[in-house]
Amino acid sequence: MKRFYKTVSIAPTDGGFAVLLDGKPVKTPSRHSLLLPTERLALAVAQEWRMQGDDVVATSMPLLRLSNTVIDGVAANRDGVITAILRFGENDLLCYRAHQPPDLAQRQREGWDPLLDWARLRFSARMIVAHGLNHVDQSPDALAALREPLQDYDAFTLVGLHVIASITGSLILALAVAEGYIPGAYAFELSRIDETYQAEKWGEDAEAQKRTAALAHELDKAVELIAAVRQEGR
């Protein structure tokens, strides 16, 4: 749609911050108030509006889109969202290993074992590792241990976690990012050990490179959302 506003600002309101276009507060697609929990997030969303040209392109405003998702859906459905996130722990990427070739198996061990050790020490989540394509059922105790920290996260952090887990295929990696154990870029790198190995062997076409860059950017924005809600460094 065509740009319909000239000025963008933020204002404290109702215990949070609103983004104003020509002095009028922005609404979500479901017509809820876009009430953001921190000034840092409000400033970041305002900057997305400010950077629009003659046309407003929704896909170029990822923080706004994620915030809309929180307000229109996640805030009223925490348990459902937590259950959806936990599914990535039930089939966590880090728990599925290659038998062959040996150098790929070694890369997986070196990259993924420290994260599983961290999850065991941090949350008492003892994950079962399988080799090959056969599914392995994680224990109820491990899944309960992974659910516990999710219960304490605010709705915005849950949305960021869901994005990270979706892109990486790993709840362990998503939790490690949210807890500040590893940066988002390293989580993305770890999640693509198999793809990187194949690209080194056989090459990677331009379309695959473009998709990889898009996923990395999407994950980065999820990390930015979490950091902005907590008003901490990335």
Image (cartoon, rainbow, N blue to C red):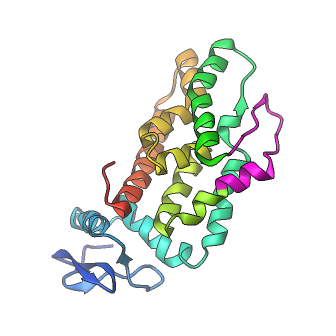
**Residue 136 in magenta?**
yes
Q: Is residue 160 visible?
A: yes
Of residue 29 and residue 77, the one placed in the foreground of this image is 77
Residue occupying image coordinates x 48% and y 49%: 179
Q: Is residue 213 left or right of residue 81?
A: left
Counting from the top left corner in percent of width and height, residue 131 is at 78, 27
Counting from the top left corner in percent of width and height, residue 87 is at 70, 54
Residue occupying image coordinates x 37% and y 54%: 224
Q: Is residue 19 left or right of residue 116?
A: left
Q: Is residue 207 visible?
A: no
Residue 199 figure quarter? top right
Counting from the top left corner in percent of width and height, residue 173 is at 55, 43
Of residue 131 and residue 181, the one placed in the foreground of this image is 181
Residue occupying image coordinates x 32% and y 70%: 38
Counting from the top left corner in percent of width and height, residue 153 is at 52, 64
Q: Is residue 22 left or right of residue 76?
A: left
User: In the figure, 51 relative to 92: above or below?
Assistant: below
User: In the figure, 93 relative to 75: above or below?
Assistant: above
Residue, far left: 7
Of residue 206 and residue 131, the one placed in the foreground of this image is 131
Of residue 47 and residue 181, the one placed in the foreground of this image is 181
> Magenta segment, which residues?
125-146
The total number of labels drawn is: 0
User: In the figure, 72 relative to 91: above or below?
Assistant: below
Residue, far top: 102
Residue 133 figure quarter? top right
**Residue 192 in magenta?**
no
Quarter of the image with the N terminus in it: bottom left
Residue occupying image coordinates x 22% and y 62%: 51
